[in-house]
Image: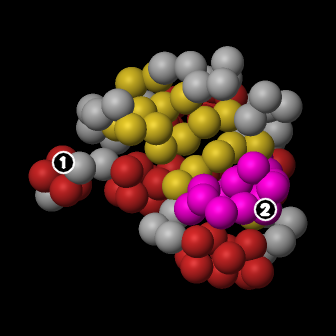
Amino acid sequence: MITEDDVRRLSLSPPDVVENPSYSTPGFRVRDRLFARMRPEGDALVLWCDDVDEKAALIASEPTTFFSTPHHDRHPTVLIRLSELEADELWEVLSDSWRVRAPQKLRE
């Protein structure tokens, strides 16, 4: 199972990432823009998508892995159950979220 330490290690890998709490949980920011945050329950992660259509597609494709809550329903953020991911999948979704939130010059 993926742990908070795994999330931290992988989240801090891309350029210009710092850890800064968000809602009293570990949050990871690229140039002060949050791109990943642990949920208070510790079993899920909040990540950014390009838009709500991509979010809906992720949830529809793998509803046991990707989900939303009423708080997140209208935002391009998707929740991910850590128990449903492998380490390589975690890296993929974290780096996708980093790309969505990072400034264009940094992505290049």
Label placed on residue 8: none
Local packing at callout 1 (Cα closer than 10 Å; few below 14, some 14-19, many 20+) is few
Q: Image point 68% across, 76% down: which residue?
A: 56
- The amino acid type of the residue labelled 1 equals Leu
**Residue 3 in the image, given as x and y percentages of width and height:** 72, 32
Name the colour scheme. Answer: secondary structure
Q: Give, as a single range, the part of the protein colored magenta.
A: 67-82
Tell me, yes or no, if residue 17 can be seen here: no
Q: In this rendered view, identify the residue nearer to me: 83 or 73.
A: 73
Residue denoted by label 2:
67
Nearest to the observer: residue 21 or residue 65: 21
Instruction: Tell me where residue 23 sits by quadrant.
Output: top right
Image quadrant containing the N terminus: top right
In the image: residue 69, left or right of residue 106: right
Q: Quadrant of the C terminus?
A: bottom left
Please identify the quarter of the rendering in which residue 85 is found: bottom right
**Residue, disc 1:** 106
